[in-house]
Image: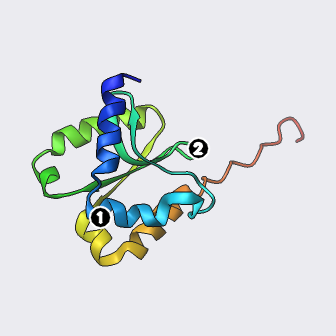
Amino acid sequence: MPKRLTQVSRMLRNNATPMERRLWQNLKNRQLDDCRFRRQHPIGDYIVDFVCLERKIVVELDGSQHGTETSKDVERDAWLADRGFRVLRFWNHEVKENVDGVVATIRDALIPPPQPLPTCEGND
């Protein structure tokens, strides 16, 4: 990981927005299904707001600046998806007005999809 990204991610952690701090209170210390979340974590050339590496879930909080940066978000989300990450995006006002609903959506995303049942071959 480039040293620059480490420094930027540390700076972002130390200067979290109020909504990032509010959501972090619900994600830290394995509170959510015993999954470990990291905040302001570098992945490739990007720094994601929150990530659960074991379940490959990225959580992004979008403020007003994201209304004009949608092409960058689409590119970033596609890059992350190509590496197996599922990206969940929430507006800051969603965290402010309904943090429990946001946390419930994240919890639902942490549930691994069911594995297909093995097929029986040759027993006709």
State the separation of the CA atoms marked 1 and 2.
Answer: 24 Å
> What secondary structure is marked by label 1?
helix
Which label number is shown at residue 19? 1
Q: Report the residue at 16% width, 51% height from top.
A: 66
Indicate the position of residue 23 as horizontal and vertical percent values: 39, 64
Q: Residues within 10 Å of mark 2 (few under 14, many from 20)?
A: few
- The reply, left or right, for residue 20 in relation to residue 25 is left
Q: Is residue 77 visible?
A: no
Q: Report the residue at 74% width, 49% height from top.
A: 117
Which quadrant of the figure has residue 18?
bottom left
Indicate the position of residue 50 as horizontal and vertical percent values: 41, 50
> What secondary structure is marked by label 2?
loop
Please determine whether, in this image, residue 75 is positioned above or below residue 100.
above
Q: The C terminus lies in which quarter of the figure?
A: top right
Camera-side residue of 35 and 17: 17
Residue type highlighted by circle 2: Glu
Which label number is shown at residue 54? 2
State the count of labels. 2
Q: How is the image coloured?
A: rainbow
Camera-side residue of 6 and 76: 6
Q: Report the residue at 63% width, 59% height from top.
A: 34
Residue type highlighted by circle 1: Met
Please determine whether, in this image, residue 52 is positioned above or below residue 99.
above
